[in-house]
Image (spheres, grey):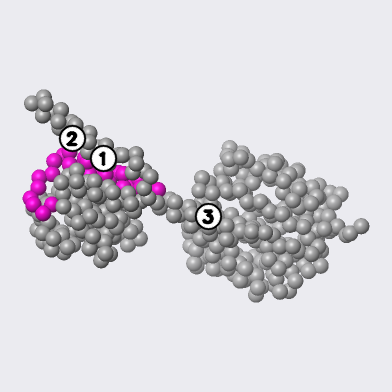
Amino acid sequence: MADAGLIQDDERLRRIEAVTDAALSRLDAADLFDELLDRVRDLLAVDTAAILLLDAPTQQLVATAAKGLEEEVRQGFRLAVGRGFAGRVALTGQPVVIEDVTPDAVANPLLLTMGLRSLLGVPMFAQDRLIGVLHVGTLRPRHFTPDDVRLLELVADRASLANAARSNNLDHTAALALQRSLLPAQLPDVPGLDLAARYVPGHVTGVGGDWYDVFTLPSGWLGLVIGDVSGHGLQSAVVMGRVRSALRAYALVCDEPAEALAMLDRKVSYFEAGSLTTALYAMISPDRTTVRISTAGHLPPVLAVPGHRGALVPVPVDPPLGTGPPPPARRQSVVDLPPGAVLVCFTDGLVERRREVIDVGVEQLVGVVQPAPAEQVCATVMAALGTDQPTDDIAVLVVGRRPPRG
């Protein structure tokens, strides 16, 4: 009896090692799914093994990988949560065993066509959230033991980790590519003006909703934009891209910043409901002497003029975009931009700190902004207020009016 117990323990250990093998971590998700399904078929002596992942928007399970049931994947089989065998596993979040398969117990006709007699299915979770179902089947009647259930749950955990890594990598790569395509690779060379900018991500993904933009309009005016879409990751980057493109379009048909932001407010309210977005839009005249500024929930810029201390531009701050009924009319201010002056636009990540009122950071920023070349101003600002580990994205856009030559 003791020898039988040792043999049983050795077999259990062999099973566990087979699905926790460190070599599996070097496989991508698709190859790992295939390898795990091959191993579990061998270890449990079953005829079929399949993974169905949850499509959250439709609440359907989608056949993603299979051994012995490859046709299920080729047909793109989908099953509503709660329906059939796999649907019941997903609905209950618990293992389900069917020792005698009947037409009433399953929803996928392929299981009946193959002649499967017994099934075992377990849920797949990622951070306590259901992401799919893993099930195995046999062509002969089979009694699945508690050890069989535990082993299949271990395989499901390994598959869940691989899927989460794949999803995170895809989101991260896509978001980085999107954000890099939307932030100017190089600021334009604008006669009479000096431009510089910084962007520092404040999230582990390196992707957020802050952005800045500079463009010359057909009228000769120069458009400056800085904005912030709440959140991080791919979704924020996607919304930011749509808002940025919309504002560029409205800038072509609006002569005033306030008018463009009013149109953008309607767009965000209708098409981006639930996204908290702030933006500042400024227009610099063709002769570079004045700036028209309108802000939607965004902090005013800092202006430093030769011979004077820096100060926040006294522009009225209207509500953020898409947060409710539009204001009666969005407002704007006209500010002089004398030779040698610098205008510093920024997002709140630069001046906002935990356990500190934002006014402290704003006052610190105002204190360090002085007339100087734009690149030097950027460097000074980031040295004084930037951080090696920001908790929020930081975007800074500096524009200076060049002094007359000589």
**Residue topped by disc 2:** 11
**Residue topped by disc 1:** 18
Q: Residues within 10 Å of mark 1 (few under 14, many from 20)?
A: some
Question: Helix, strand, or loop for circle 1?
Answer: helix
Examine the image and state in which quarter residue 341 appears.
Answer: bottom right
Point out residue 149 in the picture as x, y percentages from the top left corner: 19, 42
Quadrant into which the N terminus falls:
top left
Task: Say whether residue 199 is left or right of residue 4.
Answer: right
Distance from the alpha carbon under mark 2 to that under mark 1: 11 Å
Point out residue 236 in the picture as x, y percentages from the top left corner: 51, 56
Q: Earlier in the sequence, mark 3 or mark 2?
A: 2
Examine the residues drawn in magenta and state their main secondary structure.
helix
Task: Say whether residue 92 is left or right of residue 386.
Answer: left
Q: Earlier in the sequence, mark 2 or mark 1?
A: 2
Point out residue 238 in the picture as x, y percentages from the top left corner: 51, 60
Q: Residues within 10 Å of mark 2 (few under 14, many from 20)?
A: few
Task: Say whether residue 178 is left or right of residue 336.
Answer: left
Q: Amino acid at mark 1?
A: Ala
Q: Amino acid at mark 3?
A: Leu
> Which of the two marks, 1 or 3, is nearer to us in this view?
1
**Residue topped by disc 3:** 176
Residue nearest the observer in this picture, 303 or 37: 37
Distance from the alpha carbon under mark 1 to that under mark 3: 36 Å
| Rendered residue at 84%/49% (across/down) | 308
Single out the residue that lies furthest toward the top.
2
